[in-house]
Image (tube, rainbow, N blue to C red):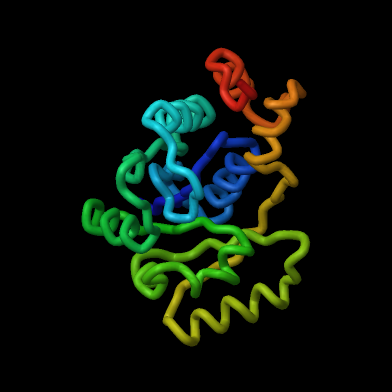
Amino acid sequence: MKIGIMGGTFDPIHIGHLLLGEFAYEDFGLDEIWYLPNGNPPHKQESEDEDALKHRVEMVRLAIEGPKHFQLCLHEAKETVHSYTYKTMRELNALYPEHEFYFILGADSLFSIEEWRYFREIFSTCTILAAMRDDKDVEDMEKQISCLESKYGAKICLLRAPLLEISSTTIRERVAEGRSIRYMVPDTVAAYIKEHHLYTVT
């Protein structure tokens, strides 16, 4: 099967994440999109407790309920181990040699990927689907893709999808301020955040 991998902290998951997965699924004829919550990403400034990880995972589970092509992958959901893309993709290829993997990332990540740990190893494990952003010119994206493909033998395709101006940071701030997050996250996720008093100032 052709599997799209959508990784992230998802704190919380929002509509933008779901739209990106759906467009990748349709435009590249993928069989499934695996949402992969990071347990302990190296870029995160503060470590979180086990409950926080469980909340993030449960919100992803709720958000992707329904579409059978959206699946939850818990491969990185370990709070004590740093999650690195190269390592995860290498392990997924070993576990599922029958699958063809497509790793979904944003334009900013495409331009900074050479700063990632062991980034060269990523290119041999998957095809990169690089999502366009309005502030990144198509010509700039194509030049970066050409450069990475030439230097490292990477396989990279442009993913043209509506990238909404929604961020998990903004959602957390709005909850803390007592403001609505309706239409920014699925209703089930909004209800979960309210029920468990997530992101509120104590």
Relative placement, left or right, of 35 versus 91 is: right
* Residue pictured at 63% horizontal, 39% vertical: 168
Residue plotted at (74% across, 21% down): 178
Residue 123 sits above or below residue 178 on the image: below
Could you tell whether 114 is left or right of 120 in the image?
right
The residue under the point 73% across, 30% down is 174
The residue furthest front is 202
- Give the answer, above or below, for where 72 lies relative to 194: below
Q: Nearer the viewer, residue 109 or 133?
A: 109
> Looking at the image, can residue 122 be seen?
yes
Q: Is residue 48 above or below residue 164?
A: above
Examine the image and state in which quarter residue 173 appears: top right
In the rendered image, the quadrant that contains the C terminus is top right
At horizontal 57% and vertical 63% (from top left) the residue drawn is 109
Residue 99, image x and y in percent? 31, 54
- Which sits in the foreground, 101 or 31? 101
Residue 181 or residue 137, whichever sits in front: 181
Across and down, in percent, residue 42 comes to 43, 54
Q: Is residue 188 visible?
A: no
Residue 104, given in percent of the width and then of the height, sits at 51, 56
Q: Position of residue 4 (x, y in %)?
A: 45, 51
